[in-house]
Image (spheres, rainbow, N blue to C red):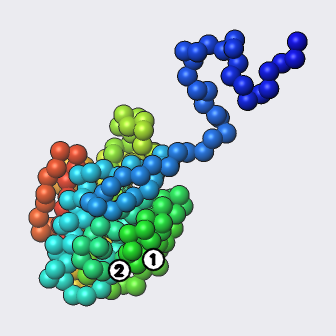
Amino acid sequence: MTPPPLDHPDPTADPTAGPTADPTAGPTEQRVDFAGVDIAYDDRVLEPRAWTVAQSTWVAELGADAPPGPILELCSGAGHMGIVAARESGRALLQVDANPVACDFARRNAATAGVVSDVRCVEMTRATIAPGSFPLVLADPPWVRRADVGRFPEDPVEAIDGGDDGTELAAQCLTVAADALRRGGHLVLQVGDERQLAALERHPRLVAGDLRLEGTRRFERGLLAHYVRG
Ligand SMILES: C[S@@+](CC[C@H](N)C(=O)[O-])C[C@H]1O[C@@H](n2cnc3c(N)ncnc32)[C@H](O)[C@@H]1O
């Protein structure tokens, strides 16, 4: 008997079986509305978290009284937080992330939002950033303790692993921000909790008075800390 053409449904197939996953298929692109901005991402980067709009908004608020100049965003991922802060404050952006996929999304998302962004795909300590030139810095480093990373199987490890106590990358952000900020400039840093914040108080640039903690805002899923450059 002649077999049916290949595009026919197979009459012997189990009708209750679902579609078979194609092992060669790439990641599926997704989109989310983040404070009115259309953001594309996939599972190779951290999924934008709705509560973090608060970090963008805080940076934009601080920008109202800050001197002109662009916003520096460290650990920008798909770029949404910096993009919203830039849109709300009418400023340009410099975004830094070590993950090339995240950087591609950040570039595309900024273009979609009509925001001017220079996206640098490099580890933050190796980014060439003009010292003392930024009035505002926003930073969202990985801050999950290494021992807890397995509790978040949906998230890419490089996006959440903050080292033994979760502050390894946050400490790097403090160093880079202290160098990049002009005097009186603002940093809004995201960490996990008060314990991490207390550990960061021993950072050499805080001890030296280059940065001082000005205030915090607590959220169910994380803590935002506002530092001022001395
Ligand atoms: C917690 S995610 C935040 C991403 C984004 N802000 C968000 O809300 O989805 C941390 C980001 O830091 C990036 N990252 C990790 N280590 C880095 C480093 N040394 N330098 C620059 N970026 C780094 C990761 O690629 C990841 O995109």
Which of the 4 quarters of the picture holds residue 216?
Answer: bottom left
Q: Residue at x 53, y 58 (%)?
A: 101
Task: Out of 98 and 104, give the one closest to the viewer.
Answer: 104
Q: Is residue 5 visible?
A: yes
Q: Is residue 211 visible?
A: no
Looking at the image, residue 65 lies above or below residue 197: below
Point out residue 58 in the picture as x, y percentages from the top left corner: 18, 67
Q: Is mark 1 within 8 Å of ligand 1?
A: no
* Disc marking residue 118: 1
Q: Secondary structure at mark 2?
A: loop
Q: Residue at x 17, y 45 (%)?
A: 220
* Disc marking residue 26: none
* Disc marking residue 92: 2
Residue closest to the far right: 1
Which quadrant does the C terminus fall into?
Answer: bottom left
Q: Amino acid at mark 1?
A: Asp
Looking at the image, residue 105 lies above or below residue 211: above
Q: Is mark 2 within 8 Å of ligand 1?
A: no
Q: Residue at x 63, y 41 (%)?
A: 25
Which of the 4 quarters of the picture holds residue 14?
Answer: top right
Q: Residue at x 72, y 25 (%)?
A: 8
Q: Amino acid at mark 2?
A: Ala
Which quadrant does the N terminus fall into?
Answer: top right
- Specify few, some or many for label 1: CA neighbours under 10 Å numbering under 14, 14-19, or 20 or more: some
Q: CB atoms at circles 1 and 2 under 8 Å apart?
A: yes
Give the quarter the ligand 1 occupies. Answer: bottom left
- Specify few, some or many for label 2: CA neighbours under 10 Å numbering under 14, 14-19, or 20 or more: many
Point out residue 12 in the picture as x, y percentages from the top left corner: 69, 11
Alpha carbons under labels 1 and 2: distance apart: 8 Å
Q: Is residue 200 left or right of residue 150?
A: left
